[in-house]
Amino acid sequence: MTTQHDHWKAQTVRRPDDVPPATPLLWQIEKLTEHSDRLMNNDLPADFPYEVERGDVGDALAAIALRESMHRDIEHGRGTRVHDAIKLGATWSELATALDITTDAARALLRTWADGQHNLYQHYVDRGDARPVGFDPDKYAAVLALTELADDETVHGGSRG
């Protein structure tokens, strides 16, 4: 019986879109490591005493595409994690420190993510989907309201500083 993981291991990746949605990062890292190991073997001397598999252009292209896929996955998750952190009581100052950006840039990151979630919801509504995903207008407004918190204010009304 072939598992989803077996199918993934056998799949050729040459573009980030060759990675199916929701492919675990761990699986992508495993595949990247295999390609990278072969590419590193190219630096070994020709008379290396052990048998090694050398990398080729396919390995180089796969490594680039996998890195880009992982980069996109990680970037996509930034808004979700910022939303989680602020809801759990982090301050904008703490978030900015964790992201190594300004508090205004952290707020902008959440706004951009919320805009995307609201647009996703509206897309499903426009299609007539009975169960749209994303942020309905109320949820969207609630998330945007979080951006109005002061730099050291928490959702619980407290201030840390």
Image: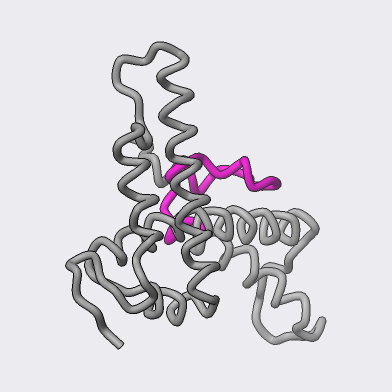
Is residue 61 rendered to the left or right of residue 18?
right
Q: Nearer the viewer, residue 74 or 20?
A: 74
Where does residue 11 sit, x and y in percent of width and height? Answer: 57, 43
Where does residue 2 sit, x and y in percent of width and height? Answer: 38, 37
Q: Nearer the viewer, residue 77 or 104?
A: 104
Residue occupying image coordinates x 50% and y 63%: 29
Residue occupying image coordinates x 58% and y 60%: 71
**Label total for image:** 0
Where does residue 73 sit, x and y in percent of width and height? Answer: 51, 54
Is residue 5 rendered to the left or right of residue 38?
left
Q: Nearer the viewer, residue 9 or 107?
A: 107
Relative to 43, say whether 143 is above or below.
above
Tell me where residue 134 sits by quadrant: top left
Tell me where residue 136 sits by quadrant: top left
In the image, is residue 20 part of the stretch drawn in magenta?
Answer: yes
Tell me where residue 32 sits by quadrant: bottom right
Looking at the image, which residue sits at the far top? 128
Residue occupying image coordinates x 64% and y 57%: 68
Is residue 18 rendered to the left or right of residue 100?
right
Q: Nearer the viewer, residue 111 or 20?
A: 111
Q: Which residues are magenta?
A: 6-28
Where does residue 102 sit, x and y in percent of width and height? Answer: 53, 76
Color style of the picture: one colour
Relative to 116, say whether 147 is above or below.
below
Residue occupying image coordinates x 77% and y 75%: 42
Relative to 97, say whether 5 is above or below.
above
**Image quadrant where one finds the C terminus:** bottom left
**Image quadrant where one finds the N terminus:** top left
In the image, is residue 15 part of the stretch drawn in magenta?
Answer: yes
